């Protein structure tokens, strides 16, 4: 029998510590929608998505009501669109994004991910067409998210794709200049992208996945922060244990919701992504967890070590709580989406170089960072290359989601709104990387990729 | 199927009575009640069996929230599994 204290502690987590299920994401394979006629392919895409995800939002809301746990987002991820659109005889891939957008609107989901290309070793004609269409695709849709995988531990880093993505990010910012470059918040450049990530903007339904699948992303930085307040001044062993226990509880709830959604939607359960995903709300910040460990401000010396421990403890606690853990799983550090990170960046303590170091030990990468609007495409590409190198060498996922906000400079703030929050524009190094990026070609995979 | 009803707010006459009446209207059986005053706030936890209920949990939740609104209390109902998942292995 449950006791009153346990019941009330769960309710306190939901009410006061922002505990929620961040997303239920339905992955849908669109490989069956390939057609030489692009119009027919788009119709098939719309039909298939709306057929499979028809009840996704309603089911999410039902579960929310019955279990009393908020489910913040309901989302869809699809097969990387370059693979589907590649079969069609057309130069213009934007209609495919519009078909995704229309389907997302019809289903009532918050986002649809998968306007993507996987080009870690080389680009097909379809990949290149898709990448070049990203600016128009993101500017002319509301729900579509895009991602491009430019490197992997196995394949190395495709530096031609890196250079191209630097230019594309600039173009996306320009195409959505009236909204401070909002489009860039829906574009992620990956190294070692995962196929079952439920989080946006980087979600896509990998080719190794089933016909359809339910993936769930949990959250709960506020709960971890609260738990750590009870162990002030105690050694790190105690801190790690506390985080593990908390992560276990949070993930158990994610597993329950995932199982329930999977059975109600008659869709196989994929994974629980046990990430600590912050929001701009006070009390829902990863930065504040790091500060609770004893750092005056997130970004000062010791931050990387604190984040490394947090990331590891979250995984260890969560992995026992779910039958299948996947996605990105760890601690996210998106600057604009984290109240503590915003404050640290605004105070000048958290800089791009420190964030890069932090990405060596966190679960993703340089995320939701605003840089000056006049940052060159080559500098953006070089930042991507640095981040991809960290991912490639350390066999981990890394990502870059930068917003070179048009007309903005250091000291300004980019207001993105909603869960995306607001981002203080951070300085980049003014020295040129142009000659480095101009080389092109491929950075070979590291020696430890040769495991066979 | 069991669910947990929780009530938090200012203590006053008739809280338990009002909730019990509402439960019986929907044919919900009360299994256990515990209440306490926690830091000045009235807190009650009630385990109920909703398997013969005439309304779904969602509808019960709406009815309880309405009652809570009238009595200036936070009242909610949640399926028991969520607490089991979090606190039991």
Image (cartoon, coloured by chain):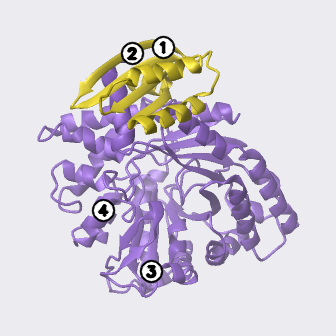
| Letter of the chain in purple | A
Residue on which the image places disc 4: A341
Residue bearing mark 2 = B33
Which of A156 and B62 lies nearest the eye of the viewer? B62
Callout in the foreground (2, 4): 2
SS at circle 1:
strand
The quadrant in which residue A110 appears is: bottom right
**Which chain is home to disc 2?**
B
Chain letter for mark 3, please: A
Residue A320, x across and y down, in percent? 42, 29
Residue name at image x 59 percent, y 42 percent:
A61
In the picture shown, does residue A3 fall above or below A306? above
Mark 2 near mark 4, Cβ–Cβ under 8 Å?
Answer: no
- In this rendered view, identify the residue nearer to me: B76 or A143: B76
Does the CB distance between marks 1 and 2 fall below 8 Å?
Answer: yes
Relative image position of residue A103 (x, y in whole percent): 73, 58
How far apart in space, not on screen, are marks 3 and 4 (Cα)? 18 Å
Q: Which residue is mark 1?
A: B30
**C-alpha separation, residue under disc 2 versus residue under disc 4:** 44 Å
Residue under label 3, please give it: A405
Q: Residues within 10 Å of mark 1 (few under 14, many from 20)?
A: some
- Can residue A170 be seen in this snapshot? no
Secondary structure of the residue carrying numbered label 3: strand
Of all chains in the rendering, the one displayed in yellow is B
Mark 3–mark 1 contact, CB under 8 Å?
no
Q: Is residue A31 among what the camera can see?
A: yes
Q: Is residue A6 left or right of residue A192?
A: left
Few, some or many residues within 10 Å of mark 3 (<14, 14–19, 20+): many
Please identify the quarter of the rendering in which residue A348 is found.
Answer: bottom left
């Amino acid at each position: 029998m449950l006791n009153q204290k346990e019941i009330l502690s769960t309710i306190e987590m939901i009410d006061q510590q922002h505990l929620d299920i961040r997303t239920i994401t339905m992955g849908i394979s669109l490989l069956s929608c390939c057609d030489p006629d692009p119009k027919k392919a788009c119709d098939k895409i719309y039909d298939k998505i709306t057929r499979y995800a028809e009840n996704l939002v309603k089911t999410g809301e039902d579960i929310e009501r019955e279990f009393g746990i908020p489910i913040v987002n309901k989302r869809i991820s699809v097969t990387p669109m370059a693979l589907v659109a590649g079969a069609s005889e057309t130069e213009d891939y934007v209609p495919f994004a519009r078909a995704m957008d229309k389907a997302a609107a019809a289903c009532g989901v918050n986002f649809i991910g998968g306007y993507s290309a996987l080009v870690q070793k080389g680009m097909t004609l379809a990949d290149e067409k898709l990448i070049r269409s990203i600016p128009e695709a993101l500017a002319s849709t509301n729900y579509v998210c895009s991602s491009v995988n430019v490197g992997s531990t196995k394949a190395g880093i495709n530096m031609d794709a890196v250079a191209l993505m630097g230019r594309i990010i600039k173009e996306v910012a320009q195409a959505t200049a009236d909204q401070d470059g909002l489009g860039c918040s829906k574009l992620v450049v990956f190294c070692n992208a995962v196929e079952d990530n439920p989080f946006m903007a980087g979600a896509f339904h990998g080719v190794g996945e089933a016909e359809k699948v339910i993936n769930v992303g949990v959250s709960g930085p506020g709960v971890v922060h609260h738990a750590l307040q009870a162990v002030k001044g105690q050694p790190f062993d105690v801190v790690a244990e506390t985080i593990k226990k908390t992560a276990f509880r949070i993930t158990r709830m994610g597993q329950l919701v995932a199982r329930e959604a999977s059975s109600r939607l008659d869709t196989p359960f994929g994974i629980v992504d046990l990430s600590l995903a912050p929001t701009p709300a006070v009390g829902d910040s990863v930065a504040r967890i790091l500060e609770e460990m004893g750092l005056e401000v997130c970004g000062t010396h010791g931050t990387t070590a604190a984040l490394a421990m947090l990331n590891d403890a979250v995984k260890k606690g969560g992995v026992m709580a779910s039958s299948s853990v996947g996605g990105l799983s760890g601690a996210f550090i998106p600057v604009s989406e984290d109240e503590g990170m915003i404050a640290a960046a605004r105070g000048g303590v958290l800089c791009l170089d420190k964030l890069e170091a932090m990405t060596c030990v966190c679960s993703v990468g340089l995320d939701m960072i605003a840089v000056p609007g006049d940052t060159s495409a080559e500098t953006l590409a070089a930042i991507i290359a640095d981040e991809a190198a960290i991912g490639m060498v350390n066999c981990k996922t890394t990502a870059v989601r930068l917003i070179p906000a048009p007309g903005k400079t250091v000291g300004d703030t980019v207001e993105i709104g909603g869960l995306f929050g607001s981002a203080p524009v951070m300085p980049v190094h003014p020295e040129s990387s142009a000659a480095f990026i101009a080389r092109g070609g491929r950075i070979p995979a590291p020696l430890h990729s040769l495991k066979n | 199927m069991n669910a947990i009803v929780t009530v938090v707010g200012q203590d006053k006459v008739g809280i338990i009575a009002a909730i019990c009446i509402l439960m019986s209207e929907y044919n919900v059986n009360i299994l256990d009640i515990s209440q306490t005053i926690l830091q000045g706030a009235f807190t009650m936890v009630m385990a109920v069996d909703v398997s013969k209920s005439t309304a779904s949990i969602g509808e019960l939740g709406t009815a309880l929230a309405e009652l809570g609104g009238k009595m200036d209390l936070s009242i909610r109902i949640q399926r028991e599994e969520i607490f089991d998942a979090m606190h039991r292995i």
